[in-house]
Image (cartoon, helix red, strand yellow):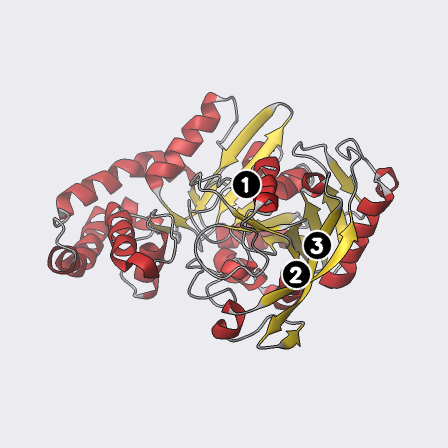
Amino acid sequence: MPALVVLGAQWGDEGKGKATDLLGGSVDYVVRYQGGNNAGHTVVVGDQKYALHLLPSGILSPECTPVIGGGVVVDPKVLLAELAGLNDRGIDTSKLLISGNAHLITPYHTSLDKVTERFLGKRKIGTTGRGIGPAYADKINRVGIRVQDLFDESILRQKVEAALDVKNQVLAKLYNRRSIAIDSVVEELLGYAPQLEPFVADTTLLLNNAIDDGKVVLFEGGQGTLLDVDHGTYPFVTSSNPTAGGACTGAGVGPTKITRVVGILKAYTTRVGAGPFPTELEDEDGEKLRQIGGEFGVTTGRDRRCGWFDAVIARYATRVNGLTDFFLTKLDVLTGWEQIPVCVAYEVDGKRVEELPYSQTDFHHAKPIYEYLPGWTEDITKAKTLEDLPANARAYVQALEDMSGAPISAIGVGPGRDETIQIRPFI
């Protein structure tokens, strides 16, 4: 039975929540393997819209067990609030499992994130200010606090003291901010322990056993390929690995157990935050895409930068993730354009470049080279098969598939769970 990875093939916000939710009824476990509450998924079920920030999309499928893996950084206050919000709407969240190895976002992480970003001024990265980067930095510096530490007050206090010994000096002497009291942090974190303890498990053991027993496990990435800290548009990236390799390290499952890697690809391109974006539109077309597509951050509410489809990025995502399939989303948003530009290559220093430049300098100066495909005006939201699409819409899908290097197995033609054309089964 398959173990699938579902991830973003652009800069995030591609519609991963819809894809994983669509598969949720067919899988036994949905695993979030990296990131924190800086990511977000919007899932529409019937007439209900759910905005998920930290929880895996499988939380909405009663048959599925949602898992937060050890590669995720968890803000316990945000997590408990999100659980309470779903419970209030009648969603059963009792099956959630959280890795004891997942690192915690503490109050001092969010404080440092916000003050550092303000201090950078024009050089700011465009973080969400939610403490994600500082929490991952502490993890790598080996001064992080993990979920399991909540259940040993002595260890927790030692770790908070060690972390704040340096951080308070940075806050006070560099940023002229008030020091953070150790006792208040320890007290707050200990207060979360009774509520979180029922969810905590050895998720690595559980997931490996599940795969060995023939269960279907879906690994869900946050953000997108171009925001990967190693393979994205550094330094304008997130602090973890949304790419397929991150599923192995973030969930504790070996690469030989992954049988399929599905990239979620929006029919155009968006990104949030600073950094290069070759096909960005700062005109009426860009605003039209933003309004029709509802391109506002699920977690932050920030306007997403919008642009035409970039086949160079799609090919790159296919390569670094080993993608087996694409799920193309938001095709319906493009209805109404007479012509639709598609970026097929870049011009860099007067030369045509068909693969993503490895140099940050070259990518910053890359100019899109477009091909123009005929548009369509017909409503496609009721389409159930490829044949139901207008000829020009089918041709657009085929062109994107040919340019991107992997087959398109599903197409989103509207925001609803059932507004999807399934071409090839994922499972």
Q: Are marks 3 and 1 in contact (CB under 8 Å)?
A: no
Q: Residues within 10 Å of mark 1 (few under 14, many from 20)?
A: many
**Is residue 166 shown left or right of residue 151?**
left
**Is residue 166 shown left or right of residue 401?**
left
- Tell me the amino acid under the disc marked 2: Ala
The front one of 184 and 192 is 184
**CA distance separating discs 3 and 2:** 15 Å
**Residue 387, disc:** none
Sequence-first tag of 3 and 1:
1
Q: Nearer the viewer, mark 1 or mark 2?
A: 1
Q: Residues within 10 Å of mark 2 (few under 14, many from 20)?
A: many
Q: Which residue is mark 2?
A: 314
Q: Are marks 1 and 2 in contact (CB under 8 Å)?
A: no
User: Which quadrant holds residue 80?
Assistant: top left
Residue occupying image coordinates x 32% and y 59% = 122
**CA distance separating discs 3 and 1:** 19 Å
The front one of 61 and 312 is 312
Q: Are marks 3 and 2 in contact (CB under 8 Å)?
A: no
Q: Is residue 292 above or below residue 392?
A: above
**CA distance separating discs 1 and 2:** 20 Å
How far from the left and from the top, in percent, is residue 271? Answer: 52, 52
How far from the left and from the top, in percent, is residue 64? Answer: 60, 37
Q: Which residue is mark 3?
A: 341
The front one of 371 and 54 is 371
- Tell me the amino acid under the disc marked 1: Glu
Q: Which residue is mark 1?
A: 295
